[in-house]
Amino acid sequence: MRYFIVFICMPVIQKIVSRLLGWVTPYLIPLFSITGAASFWLSIFGVFLKQLIANCLFVMVLYRKERYLPKKELQTNKPGGILYFAAVGFLLQFIGIVCNAVMAVFLKKLGLTVPSSPLMIPQTVWQYTAQIAVACLAPAVFEEVLFRRFVFDHIRGYSRASAVIFSALFFATAHYDFFNFPATFLVGLVLGVFRAGGAPLLYCITTHFATNCCATILNVALENAVIASFFNRYLILIFVLALVFILLLLPKHKNFCISSEEFCSEKQSYIKVLLVNPLFYVYIFCFLVLGVKSL
């Protein structure tokens, strides 16, 4: 289970990269100031560097004997499928907003602080483009290769149900974020169902990318007081409409269905394997510690 090594080491590597960036930032400011808005470009550069080193390069090293992104995973016979999966991804973000709203109420009752968005607000076309590429596209590719290819395909050897549930669980916990855990877990479940039904990685990346794009757009839009007021007033209606549209869009093909017999079958022995793996407990400990610090 090499992916547990990835999960445990990712935040450590990201922390090291952040420290290194902190040391060299005074030397980088003059360079980034040439384009204006040095703080924005330094933030984008830092996010990209952490993703590149902690996610992409580290995974490629651990899985160097396997093809990172096979050609068949990028092929599709239905060009319209891209729009379909993008629509699902876009709608999933609205479901995530409701999940976050519920979590915000829960955290406030516990006396905990609701974390703010780490993304800076772009001001120019170039900044929007950079943020979409770094905060939307890059993680969609890196994370889908890790979770819906290596993690999912490994667990699928036990059962499809295990693959869907545990890949979603690991996808959510690997973000080390209590606040966004329910929304991330929901996205992981939907992507897992797509993958279980035979969807190529291209479709999973498309859905993930659309979800991230919607979050970026809303992050900017909700800075407007009128739009923010509208969202707060009609949040439940938005949630219901998004849920209805997702249910209408979800495929009805039998390959996407997981029967109760399969869910409860003897093949689902992944839990037993998980419980005797010491790295699993190290990972859960890291999630609890870093998850609390994220609040």
Image (tube, grey):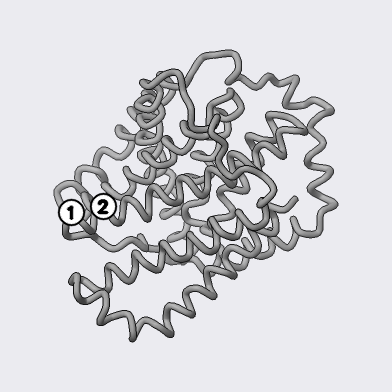
Judging by the rendered image, the residue that carries numbered circle 1 is: 125
Tell me where residue 75 appears, x and y as whole percent. Answer: 48, 27
Do the CB atoms of the residues marked 1 and 2 lie less than 8 Å apart?
yes
Q: Amino acid at mark 1?
A: Val
Residue drawn at (85%, 52%), measured in percent from left and top? 276
Tell me where residue 230 appears, x and y as whole percent. Answer: 20, 43
Q: Is residue 190 visible?
A: no
Residue drawn at (26%, 38%), measured in percent from left and top? 234
Q: What's the distance in space between the residues labelled 1 and 2, CA to CA?
A: 6 Å
Q: Amino acid at mark 2?
A: Thr
| Local SS, label 2 | helix
Q: Nearer the viewer, residue 135 or 189?
A: 135
Residue drawn at (69%, 59%), measured in percent from left and top? 5
Vertical comparison of 99 with 279: above or below = above
Vertical comparison of 41 with 81: above or below = below
Quarter occupied by residue 161? top right
Q: Is residue 198 visible?
A: yes
Q: Nearer the viewer, residue 275 or 19?
A: 19
* Residue 191 horizontal side relative to residue 212, left or right: right
Judging by the rendered image, the residue that carries numbered circle 2 is: 129
Quarter occupied by residue 247? top left
Few, some or many C-alpha atoms within 10 Å of disc 1 (few <14, some 14-19, many ≥20)? few
